[in-house]
Structures are given as C-alpha cells and as structure tokens.
Amino acid sequence: MSLAALHADRAERFDVARARADFPCLQQTVHGRPLVFLDTAASAQKPRVVIDELARMLREDYANIHRGIYDLSQRATERHDAARAKVRGLLNAGEAREIVFTRNATEGINLVAQSFVRPGVRPGDQVLITAMEHHANIVPWQLLASQCGLELAVAPITDEGELVVGELEALLSPRTKLVAVAWVSNALGTVNPVEEIIRLAHGRGVPVLLDAAQAVQHLPVDVRQLDCDFLVFSGHKLYGPSGIGALYGKAELLEAMPPYQGGGEMISSVSFAGTEFNEIPHKFEAGTPAIEAAVALGTAIDYVQDLGLGAIARHEAELLAYATEQMERVPGLHLVGTARHKCSVLSFVMDQAHPQDIGTLLDLDGIAIRTGQHCAQPAIERLGHSATARASLGLYNTGDDIDALVASLRRVAAMF
Ligand SMILES: Cc1ncc(COP(=O)(O)O)c(C=O)c1O
C-alpha cells in the first residue's frame, strides 16, 4: 500500500475505543456507574496529551512572552507563536496574523462588535442574525443597540429548526452592516448553509461573521474556501483548555479596525502625548495572554487532526443517526430540532417529565446531559418550549453510550 493510500485508509477508520482511552476523565464511575458523558456541546473532555502539555509547559517552558531576552522567554514565545500557526492551519487562514487569540468565542464576537461594527454605526444600521443564535451572538449586538442605536434584524427559523434562507435574504438591506450566524446551533444541532449565506450577503456587499463554536470540533473548516470575513471559536469545546479561543479576521479588515482593549503588548510606542498601536494580531491582544492554554490548544488541534476531522465527522454522523432512531422510539419523547442537516446535538422533551427531572434521574445512572435553555432562550421558545434536555456528542462517544442513554430514558418514561 502506498503512503498516501495508508493515510487515506487511516482517515477512513475511526477507532473510537482507542480514542476514548485517551480521555482520563471518562474512565471514572459516577454514582457507582461508568460515566457516560453527553455534554460535549457545553465543554469537551480533554485528552491526556492536552493535560500533559499544559503541565509540561508550566513546568519547563513557562515565562512571559514577547518580553524576555532570555532563553526561557524566547522558548515560551516560540511555543505561543507555534500555537497560532496551528490555529491558522486548522482554519486554513492565509496568514497567522489573521488569528487573534481571545478568551473564547464570546470575546471574539464582542471584539467584532466593538471594533468592527461600532465605529461608523449610524442609528438604524443593522446586524442580521438568526432566531437560533446562542446568547453570545445576541447580547453583544443588544449592547451596541443601547450604545449607538444599532438595530438587530432576526431571520426566522421553521418548526423543525431550519433557517428560512429566503427570509434572511429579504432582510439584507443597505442598512445591514454585518451578518452574524451560528454555523451549528448548540440548542438544536442545525447545521446552517453557511456557504449560501455568505454568497447572499457578499452579493449585497455585506461581510459575514461565522460563530463556529459548535463547528470546528465536528466539521472540517476552510475560511478561504468559505470566504467568511470573521470566524470565532472556543478552545474548550475543541478538546483544549478553557480560557483560550480565537478570532479569524481577514487581514485587511483587522488592519482597519481600532483596538478592542488598551494595555501592554498591543502598542508599538507609548508617550503621554499618544500611542502607536502594534501590528495585527497583537493590536487586539492587550496584556499577558493565556500562554499555556494557547500552547495546549495547539496540542488539541494536533490531536484532532491526527485522528482526522473527516473521520471524526463520519463517526459522529453515524452516532447521531443511531441516537435519533433509538430516541424516537422512547414513549413520549419528542426531539426538538429535526433539521435535515444536523450535527452532534439531540435536544428533546418528554411528555411525562420536566427536563430538570430527566437530567437528575439520568445523573443517577452516571449519564451527564444538559437541561434548560442552553444559552439560546429565543430558539427554545420559538420551538414552543421553556426548556429541553440535551444530549450532545463528542469524538469519544460510542453506541454503548447511546444504548445507556436510551435505557435510562425508557426508565424515566416508565417511572412518570
Ligand atoms: C453556538 C455557540 N456560540 C457561542 C458560544 C459561546 O462559547 P463560549 O462560552 O466558550 O464563549 C457557545 C457556547 O456554548 C455556542 O454553543
């Protein structure tokens, strides 16, 4: 077999048992039962290589970056720069300077709100979002509304949780300053047709921000092929540490934007008369960053790329289909969010039990799911509910996890 064929063959097969063994947290019991972790949409568990790299970085290569002439600081700086290069590679951005390290996806959206949209906004200008957004892609725009008169336009979704693309198109107008959409809905699992959305928006000269918080860990991403203007994600949902995320922005846009916060590192020269700002991306990275978290995010990216994002996507798609089929057979259970194109998320309600009761009873069986509004209250309410239970999948989940979930849900159904 040629080397290329070997690689292709390896990418085809996904050895979930082997991958699962990489996650120490999954090896425990909860309430005397093996942990079944089905809350990856909230935050993913961490593979041993990420945990080890965090500890190793703090033990061996830690110093503040960009500041020291000494070897240790230069090593830390090199490791941090390498992590940025890995994020560039993950997203297939053209240049590493188009990657701004942030705390998380939320901070990336707030940065775009304050530094891209806010300057030059006139009362009545709009940002166009959808009815299935996470609060992180709603509230920053509402803050701008109170600060400078920005309006929020919201494209509707169907009862199945699909975006009505024609309505989104109709809402585009000369007043639209930005389209900001979730690639994948954390509450419903809907995968939005982002290529089409970008094409429609660009056809009207409107830039697009993709909230990829639920996408980068499930789908291969290529910002140049997509031609999106901005994209944000969080490291902790990509099997990396919390406290680190990234904003991708086209270089010409980032260069034209004013800084988000002021402080050290984001300047090239400071006097009391005025300050010259550093180049991108440093202009947007005021203060000491999450150094070890950025480096360990780079390790998480290596980890998923080594497993193969395509192989992970196929494994999760099979599991989602199996879980959907099995859960639909549980008496009194209704899936919330049944879009044709979904990934990794199963939101549901049961006739017999409140989501909170479902979550509590499943926990007694060692099964971790999320209950409530999933930081997407408008989406949940649009589909006619005040709360749902949500099981969400990661690369380490198995058919056995789904069987355990379904058995436990059947017990809940029988109990009420
Ligand atoms: C679609 C989506 N956007 C944004 C966020 C916010 O992510 P973070 O809290 O890591 O900033 C989340 C988190 O669940 C999400 O699912």
Image (cartoon, helix red, strand yellow):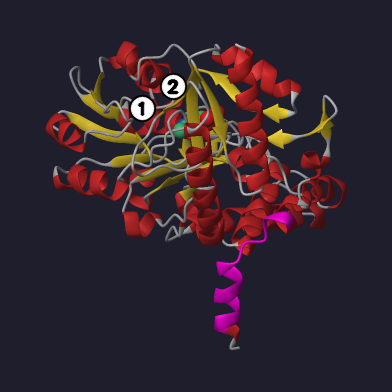
Confirm whether the magenta stretch covers residue 134: no
Residue type, label 2: Ala
Task: Identify the residue under disc 2.
Answer: 376
- Which quadrant would the N terminus be assigned to in this image? bottom right
Residue at disc 1, secondary structure: loop
Tell me the magenta residue range.
4-17
Whether residue 268 is visible to the viewer of this picture, yes or no, is no
Say whether disc 2 or disc 1 marks the residue closer to the N-terminus: 1
Whether residue 43 is visible to the viewer of this picture, yes or no, is yes
Return the mark for residue 132.
1
The image position of residue 329, as x and y in percent, is 49, 32
Residue drawn where x is 48% and y is 39% of the image: 324
Q: Is 304 located above or below residue 262 in the figure?
A: below
Residue drawn where x is 15% and y is 36% of the image: 166
Foreground pick, 328 / 300: 328
Residue drawn where x is 31% and y is 54% of the image: 227
Disc 2, disc 1: CB below 8 Å?
yes
Disc 2, ligand 1: is the CB inside 8 Å? yes
- Residue lying farthest to the bottom in this orientation: 1
The image position of residue 335, as x and y in percent, is 44, 28
Foreground pick, 75 / 152: 152
